[in-house]
Amino acid sequence: MRGLFRRALPLGAAAVATMLALPATAQAHGIVGKADLPIPVWLFSWAAAIVLVVSFVALSTMWTTPRLQQPHLRRLFRLPAPVEWLACALGLLVFAVVIYSGFDGAQVPVANFSVDFIYVNFWVGVPIASVLFGGVFRALSPWRTVARMLSAALRAVRGGRSWAPLGYPRRLGLWPAAAGIVGFAWLELVYVERDRPSILAALSLGYFALMLAGMLLFGVDEWSERADGFGVYFGLLARLSPLTRDERGWVCLRRPLSGITGLEVGPGTIGFICVLIGTTTFDGFSNGGIWRNNEPELQSLFADLGFHATPAQELTGSLGMLLCILLIGGVYRLGIAGVKSVSDRYDTDTLRTKFAHSLVPIGFAYVLAHYFSLFLWNGQAIIYLASDPLGDGSNIFGTSGYQIDYHVISYAGIWYVQVAALLAGHVGGLMLAHDRALVLYRDQEEAVRSQYWMLAVMVAFTSFGLWLLSAVGT
């Protein structure tokens, strides 16, 4: 016991030192404005470092056998088939409203249903619902629903034989899905015309057509689980949920975090996870003073190369987003290199594969912390936009007069939720990494030593996450 505490002490000191380097001012995401915290940010930083180190010590001393490698399912109830059909119909209906409002509605972002729904309810709300309730997007996905119907019709025409003329190339793995998420993140964070409803509607139709073609050619489930960026993303987060469905359609309760341990890590899986964290990182970083102070110089550099103002701005944003993704991948590679230095039992590629799932809770933590205020406030806009999706003065459900309640939570309360989300995600990642180490290493002492480096990775991600929330450098 004393030996473990002595070994954890230097790590704790390093973590605290890292936290002390964080700024002492805070600004919440998006439209929140500056938070009036009851305690200074540096105290949050100290607390975050202490929580991670104490969690590491507790895991090292009390968690001596693997506990998350099996889900331990407990059946709750069978979901009636009509519920799934209703979910499919709802997904198709909402998608139709998005397309209709995008093309025929007022081309004013705040008055058009499509803009708020895509960037808030879909991009932020579905990930939260996936973690809370499991794989809800499988039923809600409009392109998956249409592909299933067309596949069933083609099977009937072919006398029961399945229709999937091509086999999905295994070497592609999740890289197409990663490209899809990068594309959406680029649309949201970099593209100048990001909030024009008609453009969003056209892009939505294009993505629908691409996904439909892929599912018909390569198989619905095969394409959904590998090439559909949103399907892969929401499905990945659904593995964090305590709820799942078994092969017989029962809704089951499982041990928290146990669903992610069975993640199949193939080509592009680690890249996909780094994309999730890296794009969210860039969203926060681009709102900070360091980026704002240096962005004009980068734009000038592209302008000197012959690009006009808008392409120069978009190229600058693209470069920043790419660097953030590479930074996340580099931090993880550094941590795995440290794990490799503890023992020659496994090579670097094996270790990268075995511990990749521990990054998933961090990815969700970044999303929840970064977009919490946006979802809490702008998400309310769907109440009045649903009644007036075209922005033409309609009042279909009688809620067009609703106004967003910005007092539902204080600025300090938002910061508490954000910090709690970051800490919970990183502690969850630490738990998953420790549990996997107990499986890989027969000697518990060796397993604990391998996790020094994973603790360093978690501290680094927590520090960076808090720094991004503080939006410093003005």
Image: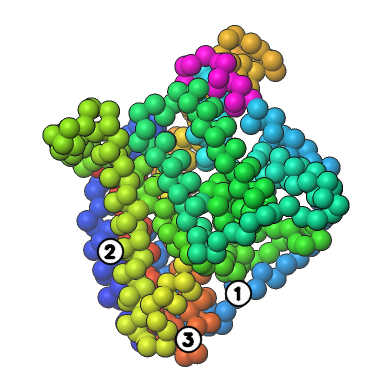
> Between disc 3 and disc 2, whose residue precedes?
2
Mark 1 = which residue? 69
State the mark number for residue 308.
none
Residue 406: image x %, image y %?
Answer: 48, 27
Quarter of the image that includes the N terminus: bottom left
SS state under label 2: helix
User: So how many labels did they put on this image?
Assistant: 3
Going from N to C along the chain, the mark reached first, 1 or 3, is 1
Q: How would you classify the magenta stretch by its main secondary structure? A: helix
Question: Which quadrant holds residue 299?
Answer: top left
Residue that carries the numbered disc 2 in the rendered image: 16
Considering only vertical position in the picture, is 204 above or below 325?
A: above
Q: Residues within 10 Å of mark 3 (few under 14, many from 20)?
A: some
Q: What span is in magenta?
A: 97-109
Q: Amino acid at mark 3?
A: Tyr
> Residue 133: x, y in percent?
66, 50
Point out which mark residue 441 bears.
3
Report the amino acid beneath label 1: Gln
